[in-house]
Amino acid sequence: MCGIVGVLGNHEVSPQILDALKRLEYRGYDSAGIATINRGKLDLRRAVGKLINLSDILVHEPLPGRSGIGHTRWATHGGPSVANAHPHRAGRVAVVHNGIIENFRALREELGAEGISFSSETDTETIVQLASLYLERGMTAVEAARATLKRLEGAFAVAFLFEGEEDMIICARRGSPLCIGHGQNEMYLGSDAIALAELTDRITYLEEGDWAILSRSGALIFDADDHQTNRPVTRINVETARVDKSGHRHFMAKEMAEQPRVLQASMSHYAGLSGGDITLPAELDFANTDRLIMVACGTAFYACQVAKYWFEKYAGLPVELDIASEFRYRDPVLGPNNTALFVSQSGETADTLAALRHVSPHVAQVVSVINVPTSSIARESAVALPIHAGPEIGVASTKAFTAQLQVLALLALKAGMQRGRLTPEAFEARLAELRAVPGFVAQALDREEEIRRLTETLSQARDVLFLGRGVMYPLALEGALKLKEISYIHAEAYAAGELKHGPIALVDTDLPVIVFAPHDGLFEKTASNMQEVMARQGTVILISDAQGLAEAGDVPYCLQMPTVPEFIAPIIYAVPAQLIAYHTALHRGTDVDQPRNLAKSVTVE
Ligand code: M6R
């Protein structure tokens, strides 16, 4: 969370920094700020709320200067306020920071004993106060930054700007991503390459523990042991890094609409446009795996939950699932023949990354399914499988979910072949079904207007219940998460059979109950649970296919999905889950792409 930008330029940098921050706003939008050095003097502007507020301030109070740092914040220590907004300044130093300084209390006390008073509630201010103190004690800027970094505990990325040092930004990466951009006698710094896409296509990714001194002529990079080191300059595809809404009202709308194309691209990467094989890195071995451990957060976790059914059914592989933030803090029993699989859109989710580091030494192979190939999770996995979804900017994950499902389905089939659980005929049949996914997803998207009408009433609800069985249970969970996230309506999901063990007490005429129930082997069971709800005056919205709707009888609200093979149904039924949340949020007038309290990339534990 929080986005960091730095520019050592040849023109006014505030507009460049503001523009780069716009591309990082998905990381947090509680406040924003910029600091520059102009004629040797440090100055800054900060504003609460979205970047537009900072832009407005800059119109009236421009911030000249050719060297600067900027920040967009997702609050951790201290609420959203100007005082807590970054950059923080003390004396001749300004700092922007992403992450958490875990020993900030001890540092605050120590600095307090030196007579230093704090003007914010943030952990970040300890960084800038320490650096300022070291400067006052006679250290150079580089020495002060280095000495400060050595005192910090936690996971963070940080950038320092020093008054009087117009050709220097010092930055460090410890736990949170940071990359350096190379320009024509200009240098840039960003939390990710997307931030710098309009400035350069030449990027150096800092490694864990690195710190660097940037000047307009280049970067001196040091590793965690202070040895000067070389990190490669890679060329990024600025076209794919560029982000716009392409005529859609929201990023979420664009990203939902992109799904057929994304799924097609991802499929052709792993399985070509036709033929009967799946191409995966040769070292990926499920034949000798005795247990698959899948770990993720949020929507990515629900993708794992669906995949558990697939790995068990098609590969006969025992699967253990956990939420990353829980997994690390119990004592999971790990074995030398286990495969650990981590799923993450951003590849930077702190809990998932920490879980990966926790298991790595103890298992046979660490595999990840990620959207950002340069991310920390990708780089720290033995095998990283990109989902090829392109940048996902809307906080609510949509295309990444369906693309994760597709790659996980391919993996499950490959595992089924490697383990001799699938005959070649069954393998080819399932693969052919997967190839049909983009077309079915397009058909599901065509139901948008019907869904929009359904949500007119739904948007009035205070609570909503989602039900599903088997692979539709994680879909119900995903539907409830999407709805909570962007419409702020309280929503819960239950395995349909679990309803009678408690939650049915909630059912009354005011409670809409959304049921995901394609006509599969579990349909009769789910339909019975639905009848139990209707018998208690619950308002059911049934999402099923033609046969399911015909057999369901008289249901208050129905939504017809295409008839699809059971294997791929979860990917297709993700679409109504997304569209229901989207249109409910539109009716309620909430901020779809940047819902309150959330950030796209959760890089703090
Ligand atoms: O980047 P990741 O996939 O690791 O993110 C995990 C969750 O934070 C994410 O899926 C979150 O739940 C989404 N906002 C859900 O729409």
Image (cartoon, helix red, strand yellow):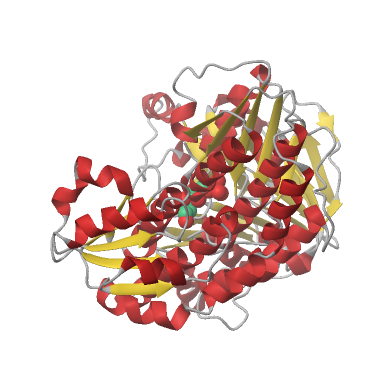
In the rendered image, residue 481, in percent from the top left (x then y), is placed at 39, 54
Residue at the image point whose x is 15% and y is 60% from the top: 535
Of residue 275 and residue 588, the one placed in the foreground of this image is 275
Please identify the residue farthest to the front as the structure is shown: 551
Residue at the image point whose x is 68% and y is 65% from the top: 436
In the rendered image, residue 46, in percent from the top left (x then y), is placed at 45, 61
In the rendered image, residue 441, in percent from the top left (x then y), is placed at 59, 69
Residue 595, compared with residue 204, is above or below; it is: below
In the rendered image, residue 245, in percent from the top left (x then y), is placed at 59, 76
Residue at the image point whose x is 35% and y is 42% from the top: 121
Of residue 417 and residue 486, the one placed in the foreground of this image is 417
- Occupied quadrant, residue 81: bottom left
- Occupied quadrant, residue 237: bottom right
- Occupied quadrant, residue 143: top right
**In-image side of 124 versus 48 (left or right):** right
Q: Is residue 367 visible?
A: yes
Q: Is residue 65 visible?
A: no
Of residue 400 and residue 1, the one placed in the foreground of this image is 400
Residue 321, compared with residue 236, is above or below; it is: above
